[in-house]
Amino acid sequence: MFYQLYELNHAAMAPFRAAADIMRFAYANPLNPFSHTPFGRTMAASLEMFERTTRRYGKPEFGLKQTTIGDRTVSVREEVVWSRPFCNLLHFARSVPAARGNDPRILIVAPMSGHYATLLRGTVEALLPSADIYITDWIDARMVPMTEGTFDFDDYVDYVIEMLHFLGHDTHVIAVCQPSVPVLAAAAVMEEARDPLSPASMTLMGGPIDTRINPTAVNKLAQERSLQWFSDNVIMNVPWPQPGFMRPVYPGFLQLSGFMSMNLDRHLRRAQGILHASREERRRAGKTSRFLRRISRRYGSDRRILSADGGGGLHQAFTAEGRTDASRQTR
């Protein structure tokens, strides 16, 4: 019922959010004499905080329209080249001359534990000048109807193998954080089967390969509580009228709350900085505003359970943010 109450509260707050946005505009308008007073600035900041706190942020765009290769600027086109119910494979197609030859083909497997793939926008941007980039774009679980079936750990591994088969020979794979485990499993399965399309190289960055090393507060919590406790307290069914109605998920708002609570003092100080910003300080507070917006967008989606019984995937979801070991690369 908690998820249903959250959705009901969000809908009930819609008119208040709209009113706060209108009032904020009025108090921030330089034609309003109050906008030049401490009272007006405080009201504008307070209304802005209320509107942002109650807003539901959409999925951000990559926005990578061009890149620089050598001394030339070339256009970049984002396209979906492979699609399944729970994931799209995005390709950043570059307009490069045929004489350049083939750059390395890289599959980036983005985290699906509460993140959008745009979390890795900087990584994609940095690799574009020297590589042909593909990235997984996981679909919000609450948008996937129950008729599409479940998505467990085996399905995750199968998705990775299917994508590598689709991309063909000499594909390099990079897994960032949470997907390190299923990518490692997929590579192992392919190698054991002597699959000719096994990845040319595999890079695991900050993944929870062995959560016993350098345990964080998240790892310790996973050890202190049973799987049944997590299943009872953080797994909830998607409410109506979402397309994924009744699908069991780990809601994005819970993940955001957990993320914020790990550095609560820091986020409260940032929020207070916006609230008390004077007119001259608002320009500098813009960086804080953008930071908070990015965090809200990253954790705006629900994640599906990674095992049919809520077992291994649930444990993985709670260790995904541990970042317990350094980047590893095998060839």
Image (cartoon, rainbow, N blue to C red):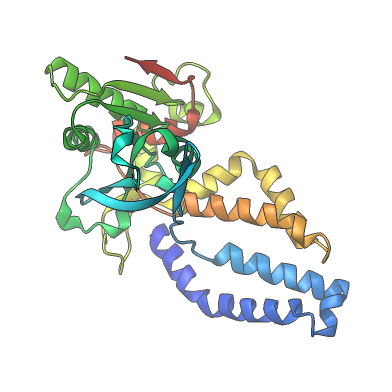
Q: Where residue 71 sits in the image (x, y, percent)?
A: 50, 39
Q: Quadrant of the N terminus?
A: bottom left
- The quarter of the picture where residue 26 lies is bottom right
Q: Which of 232 and 104 is in front in this view?
A: 104
Q: Where residue 137 sits in the image (x, y, percent)?
A: 33, 47
Residue furthest to the front? 99
Q: Where residue 165 sits in the image (x, y, percent)?
A: 16, 33
Can residue 35 be seen here? Answer: yes
Q: Is residue 326 above or below residue 57?
A: above
Horizontal side of residue 300 vs 306, given as left or right: right
Residue at position x 68%, y 52% in the image: 288
Q: Where residue 271 sits in the image (x, y, percent)?
A: 70, 55
Q: In this view, does 294 lie above or below 7?
A: above
Q: In this view, does 95 lie above or below 187?
A: below
Residue at position x 17%, y 36% in the image: 162
Residue at position x 84%, y 74% in the image: 39
Q: Which of 196 and 145 is in front in this view?
A: 196
Q: Quadrant of the C terminus?
A: top left
Horizontal side of residue 180 vs 166, given as left or right: right
- The quarter of the picture where residue 30 lies is bottom right
